[in-house]
Image: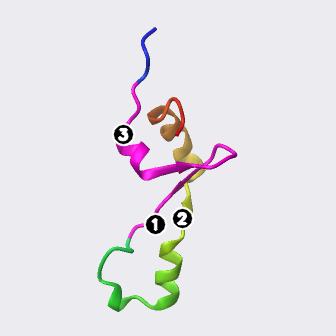
Amino acid sequence: MPKLKTRKCAAKRLKQTGTGSFRHHKAGARHLKSSKNAKRKRRLRQDAAVSHAEKRRIQVALPYGL
């Protein structure tokens, strides 16, 4: 059986934790920051966990992990 290809779009956007779950950056932190309050901007800086529903799709896209 041939080797499986890694989806590069997923590999560049996700990080895998030690336990095998995935983290991603939150959307909305790039521009139009003057209308957002400081608390909201702080929360947008933190990574978020990938939802359980998306985990299977990500494992298919990244067959060998990260």
Q: Nearer the viewer, residue 52 or 60?
A: 60
Mark 2–mark 3 CB contact (< 8 Å):
no
Residue located beneath label 3 in the image: 8
Mark 2 secondary-structure assignment: loop
Q: Is residue 6 magenta?
A: yes
Q: Amino acid at mark 3?
A: Lys
The vertical placement of 25 against 52, above or below, is below
The vertical placement of 45 against 3, above or below, is below
Q: Amino acid at mark 1?
A: Lys
Q: Nearer the viewer, residue 66 or 53?
A: 66
Foreground tag (3 vs 1)? 3
Q: Which mark is residue 47?
A: 2
The vertical placement of 62 against 46, above or below, is above
Residue 13 place in picture, x, y as percent: 42, 52
Q: Nearer the viewer, residue 66 or 49?
A: 66
Query: Which of the two labelled residues, at mark 2 and mark 1, occupies the earlier sequence position?
Result: 1
Mark 1 secondary-structure assignment: loop
The vertical placement of 2 against 28, above or below, is above
Residue at (40% x, 88% y) in the render:
36
Mark 3 crowd level (few <14, some 14–19, many ≥20, 10 Å Cα)? few
Mark 3 secondary-structure assignment: helix
Residue 8 place in picture, x, y as percent: 36, 39
Q: Residue furthest top?
A: 1
Residue located beneath label 1 in the image: 26
Mark 1 crowd level (few <14, some 14–19, many ≥20, 10 Å Cα)? some
Residue at (64% x, 43% y) in the render:
20
Residue 9 place in picture, x, y as percent: 35, 44
Q: Amino acid at mark 2?
A: Asp
Separation of residues labelled 3 and 1 (CA atoms): 19 Å
Separation of residues labelled 2 and 1 (CA atoms): 6 Å
Q: Residue furthest right?
A: 19
Range drawn in magenta: 5-27
